[in-house]
Image (cartoon, grey):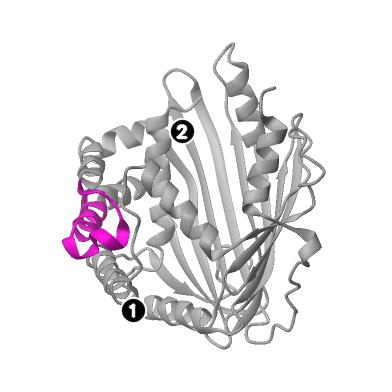
């Protein structure tokens, strides 16, 4: 079983690798991504679909049945999603399909509907977790008040002050964070603009231009060091500013502790722990300049002195279609198809409480 420290390094490297894919020296590639992303964000409507596949080949700790079950569940996991977004109407649909293959196979389908400030989440039927019939198949109606209450409870449990909404400061914060990323990665030759024919993998037909960011086992340690030693400290510096304290709700001590946890990081340790087999991000831009396609593939081998090698691969795709042409109607669940969040909590509490 991979140790937590190793997963921490992998998580930091992978997540930030995706976020940094649009930061490069190649002005043409960078501008195409920047403009394409902005155009998709301004689109009034579009349909979308995508997948997230995770495969892992690991040797669980001897005699640990719980770890063995977790490893088996993660050995072949696939998540599919699809839906539509309507900006002006403030409506959206999101259908989530989760599939776990193997002896402990599991398949779940979770439709989600967004209408203005209300969210409806359909409760799935879960074989390993029998739910009350009064709950299964119903849409849980989550209101704005419910979300505010949950956010406040989470802040209290973490001893944090609940973040205070401030659109002007949010815009200012985003601008500073963008500047921090540009500062660290304005000279990066790994970002290139290529034709569809020369792209590393096949892309959907609407895509007319591809921007790619590739990582090899040789340049990966350098990239991660730049992230851990340069980018993250700069981000923490921005987040530590007094003017953003109420906006983020993150205690200053928590930011300092996080920075200290990274101080001991070295690329030598990373090289021993991780081998990158293949890592690439693809961005597809359609004929109208919209960023309509995204694929991130990360294949690596983690090395552990106790459990040996673990091979894992993550493959994520996102595809937007019918941009500004989507005509699907958002079906809002009827009253008799819904239950409130409070009713769900009450019924689940009654079903699983100890007699």
Choose the circle earlier in sequence order: 1 or 2: 1
Looking at the rendered structure, the secondary structure element under dot 1 is helix
How many C-alpha atoms fall within 10 Å of the one at disc 2: few (<14), some, or many (≥20)?
A: many
For residue 265, say whether it is visible: no
| Labels 1 and 2 touching (C-beta < 8 A) | no
For residue 207, what is the image quadrant? bottom right
Residue furthest top in the image: 63
Magenta part of the chain: 229-252
- Up the image or down, 87 lies above or below 274; here it is below
Residue receiving disc 1: 27
Looking at the rendered structure, the secondary structure element under dot 2 is strand
Residue 159 on image: x %, y %: 32, 43
Decide whether the magenta segment is chiefly helix, strand or loop. helix
Q: Nearer the viewer, residue 333 or 92?
A: 333
How many C-alpha atoms fall within 10 Å of the one at disc 1: few (<14), some, or many (≥20)?
A: some
Q: Nearer the viewer, residue 20 or 348?
A: 348
Residue 176 on image: x %, y %: 24, 69
Q: How many marks overall?
A: 2
- Does the magenta run of residues contain 261? no
Q: Name the residue rendered at 43%, 47% in the picture.
A: 154
- Does the magenta run of residues contain 231? yes
Residue receiving disc 2: 302
Q: Give the CA distance from mark 1 to mark 2.
A: 35 Å
Q: Name the residue rendered at 59%, 36% in the picture.
A: 56
Left or right, 309 with reference to 51: left
In the rendered image, the quadrant that contains the C terminus is top right
Residue 236 on image: x %, y %: 23, 54
For residue 331, what is the image quadrant? bottom right
- Up the image or down, 158 lies above or below 340; here it is above
Left or right, 180 with reference to 284: left
Q: Name the residue rendered at 38%, 75% in the picture.
A: 30
For residue 318, say whether it is visible: yes
């Amino acid at each position: 079983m991979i140790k937590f420290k190793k997963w921490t390094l992998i998580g930091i490297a992978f997540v930030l690798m995706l976020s940094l894919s649009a930061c490069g020296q190649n002005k043409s590639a960078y501008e195409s991504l920047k403009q394409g992303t902005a155009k998709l964000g301004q689109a009034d409507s579009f349909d979308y679909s995508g997948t997230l596949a995770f495969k892992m080949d690991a040797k669980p700790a001897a005699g640990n049945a719980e770890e063995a079950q977790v490893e088996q569940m993660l050995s072949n996991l696939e998540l599919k999603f699809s839906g539509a977004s309507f900006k002006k109407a403030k409506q959206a649909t999101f259908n989530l399909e989760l599939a776990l293959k193997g002896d402990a196979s599991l398949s779940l389908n979770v439709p989600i509907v967004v209408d203005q400030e209300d969210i409806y989440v359909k409760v799935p039927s879960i074989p390993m977790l029998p739910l009350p019939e009064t709950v299964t198949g119903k849409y849980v109606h989550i209101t704005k008040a419910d979300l505010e209450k949950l956010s406040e409870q989470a802040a209290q449990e973490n001893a944090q002050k609940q973040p205070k909404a401030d659109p002007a400061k949010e815009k200012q914060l985003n601008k500073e964070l963008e500047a921090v990323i540009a500062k660290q990665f304005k000279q990066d030759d790994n970002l290139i603009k290529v034709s569809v024919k020369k792209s590393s993998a096949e892309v959907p037909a609407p895509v007319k231009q591809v921007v790619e960011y590739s990582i090899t086992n040789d340049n990966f340690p350098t990239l991660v060091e730049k992230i851990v030693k340069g980018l993250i400290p700069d981000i923490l510096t921005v987040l530590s500013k007094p003017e953003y304290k109420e906006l983020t709700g993150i205690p200053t001590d928590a930011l300092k502790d996080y920075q200290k946890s990274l101080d001991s990081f070295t690329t030598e340790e990373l090289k021993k722990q991780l081998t990158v087999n293949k890592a690439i991000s693809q961005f597809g831009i359609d004929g109208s300049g919209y960023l309509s396609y995204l694929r991130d593939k990360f294949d690596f081998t983690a090395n552990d002195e106790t459990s040996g090698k673990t091979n894992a691969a993550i493959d994520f795709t996102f595809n937007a279609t019918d941009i500004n042409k989507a005509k699907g109607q958002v079906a809002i669940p009827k009253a008799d198809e819904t239950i409130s969040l409070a009713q769900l909590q009450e019924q689940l509490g009654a079903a699983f409480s100890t007699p």
